[in-house]
Amino acid sequence: MADWSPVHPVHPEEGDRAGLPEPQDRIDYVLHNARGLRALASRTLLLGTPAPWPDVAGNAWPSDHAAVVTAFALRP
């Protein structure tokens, strides 16, 4: 079963939820393990307009999810 992504707007064609809308409510986390860093802001990076499955070959990225870009500051 596919989880939320911009290329899976509906559940896959299996089971009792087949064809139902997939909630577009994914939550991503930015994890780091670096002392002296503080996360300032994050944003989603999405290139172009993603085509839904199965027509994903022309999408601008190889994953079924967009990216999260985070700006960090160095702590004194």
Image: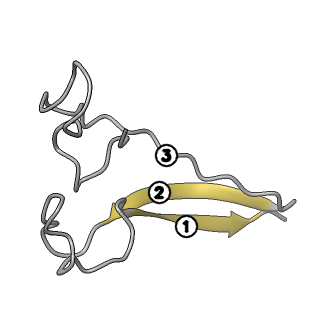
Tag 2: amino acid: Ser
Instruction: Please provide percent x and percent y for residue 9.
Output: 16, 44
Report helix, strand or loop for mark 2.
Answer: strand
Label 3 vs label 2, nearer the camera = 3
Instruction: Please provide percent x and percent y for residue 8.
Output: 23, 48
Q: Is residue 16 above or below residue 39?
A: above
Which numbered marker is on residue 71? 1
Task: Count neighbours of disc 3 (C-alpha within 10 A) and say few if under 14, some if 14 to 19, many if 20 or more.
Answer: few
Q: Image check: 15 left or right of 53?
A: right
Q: Are marks 1 and 2 in contact (CB under 8 Å)?
A: yes
The mark nearer the N terminus, 1 or 3, is 3
Quarter in which the N terminus is drawn: top left
Q: Is residue 28 above or below residue 55?
A: above
Measuring 76% from the left and 61% from the top, which residue is drawn there? Answer: 37
Q: Is residue 2 above or below residue 60?
A: above
Instruction: Please provide percent x and percent y for residue 23.
Output: 24, 31
